Image (tube, helix red, strand yellow):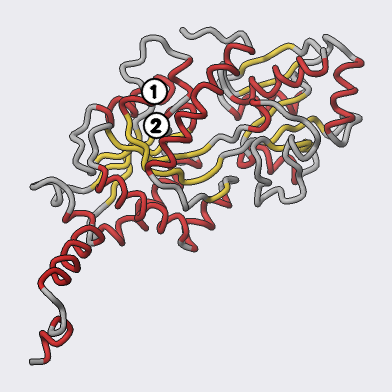
Amino acid sequence: MAYDAPFARCSRRQLLTMVASAVATGPLHAQLQAGSANRPVRVVVPFAPGGATDVIARVLGERMAQDFSQPVLVENKTGAAGLLAGEAVVRSVPDGTTLLLGSTSSMLSNKYLYKKAAYDPLVDLKPLTRVCAASIVMVVHSAAPVRNMQEFMAWIKERKSKFSYGSYGIGSQAQLVGAMLSDMAGADMVHVAYRGEAPMVQGMLTGEIQVSTGSVLSIKPHIDSGKLRPLAVTGLLRMPLLPDMPTFEQAGYQGDALNIGGWLGIAGPKDLPDATAKRWAEIINRAVASRQVTARIIAAGFIPLNTDTPEGTARLWAQEGPVWQRMFQRAGIEPT
């Protein structure tokens, strides 16, 4: 008979192996706990609607839903530096229907900034994969007499104690970059912490500060207009939107705050089954690799990543955690 021809030459053991393989690689909802497959998946985002992370979460969720064959909804839960969103996921049922899409700060480095956090991201979250690298770019005003990092370092060293550098918040990588460069040059630059990137960029444009570091999405329009001049980017990869801009390492400067790269990643609660975590990672990585999501990630100023596994992501988090702790200690940032 035609319908059983493909299995006619299979032994019982081979047939069982094929069935087991199909279960392991089949639709994700077949692996979720009983009764949960009819619920839509929530992707909790610790940022307000309309921002780059929110936009990426929504386009990513649409693409994930195609593989999952069920709705994937984005839920914005802001407040407490991302801790509220993380707590919502940590307290959720570990059935694969509640995930967290957050940044390095909300999913890792906050551990070293807040003593009274309700959870430990390295213990209470199960990493799935990273979505993109989120490096930041250092800029000076176009009127500054410097065009590269060597000239910048000589400039701030010569005019010691006469410069201020801005950041988008206490404990941000922007603060850590400025503090490290100030120490390297012996420049004694003053840190000015703003409440977000928008006021920080405005401070650059009005001359309140002489140097700052922030996202390409916020800063590139002013680079394009000629008002701000980029000097280097953090991390080990050049940015697609600034392909001619060297990393700090390529410019000749090494240091944790300069060479480490931020990222956006996805995690679930700690008791999420390994098989479910693996399947979600596969679905997310395929979504990131799609033309639509890749284009949106690049347009937001990030670098797409689509090869991480849950095990590899967990190792990365464990390795990077002490690095962030060390950077905070060196910058004199005490946990509150």
Residue 83 lies, in percent from the top left, at 37, 23
Q: 200 or 179, which lies in front?
A: 179
Residue 212 versus residue 33 in the image, above or below: above
Mark 2: amino acid: Pro
Residue 272 versus residue 56 in the image, above or below: above
Instruction: State the residue position of label 1.
Output: 79
Circle 1: element type: loop
Answer with left or right where residue 302 lies relative to residue 37: right
Answer with left or right where residue 255 lies relative to residue 310: right
Answer with left or right where residue 49 lies relative to residue 278: right
Q: 49 or 111, which lies in front?
A: 111
Say which label, 1 or 2, has the lower sequence index.
2
Q: What residue is shown at x 60% (from left), y 18% (from top)?
A: 327
Q: What residue is shown at x 56% (from left), y 18% (from top)?
A: 171
Residue 15 lies, in percent from the top left, at 14, 71
Instruction: State the residue position of label 2.
Output: 46
